[in-house]
Image: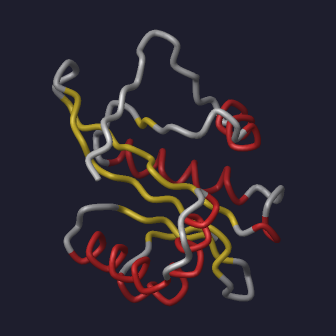
Amino acid sequence: MVRQATTADLDALVPLFDAYRVFYRKTSDPELARTFLSERLSRNQSVVFLAMREDGAAVGFTQLYPSFSSAAAAPVFILNDLFVAPDARRNGVGALLLAAAVRFACAAGAVWLTLSTEVTNRTAQALYEKEGWVRQSDFFVYNLGLV
């Protein structure tokens, strides 16, 4: 089951979010994870979907950030995070989370969802492509580190 998370779900979300950050080579910091998620959710700055097993265990999440397209003059969402616990992978959890994100974005009137992943994350790339996401080849992405 996938449902939209609230601040009441922080105890279930924090271990997943912390593991997500560790996957991306950040130091484990559950308190930082709790503070970050709490702020995003309480300020309505992101939308989080939480995947739960039938026994109530949280096994995955995705986080969307609202944005806008000036060219389309319409809302868009950035699917910034998608994580499935290792013991729940290859069971369709990622696809369920992506589908929840799509339904939410469509209902919100968004014209597209966008995401990025590391070049080496072939497992995620395969999932995205299987679910109909198309790798962009007509734009370059640039980042500027500020800290």
Instruction: Please state the horizontal and vertical placement of residue 132, each as a whole percent of the image.
Output: 63, 29
Here the colouring is secondary structure
Q: Is residue 108 above or below residue 75?
A: below
Instruction: Please state the horizontal and vertical placement of residue 126, each as a whole percent of the image.
Output: 74, 35
Q: In the visual, does 39 lie left or right of 7?
A: left
Q: In the visual, does 93 lie left or right of 79?
A: right
Q: Is residue 80 above or below residue 36?
A: above
* Residue at x 51%, y 19% (from the top left corner): 136
Instruction: Please state the horizontal and vertical placement of residue 50, each as a whole percent of the image.
Output: 54, 70
Q: Is residue 11 above or below residue 19?
A: below
Instruction: Please state the horizontal and vertical placement of residue 40, each as a whole percent of the image.
Output: 29, 69
* Residue at x 41%, y 14% (from the top left corner): 139
Quadrant in which the N terminus appears: bottom right
* Residue at x 67%, y 54% (from the top left corner): 94
Picture quadrant where residue 78 is located: top left
The residue positioned farthest toward the front in the image shown: 147
Q: In the visual, does 122 lie left or right of 102?
A: right
Front residue of 122 and 66? 122
Front residue of 18 and 5? 18
Q: Is residue 84 above or below residue 65?
A: below
Picture quadrant where residue 120 is located: top right
Q: In the visual, does 90 lie left or right of 103?
A: right
* Residue at x 23%, y 29% (from the top left corner): 69
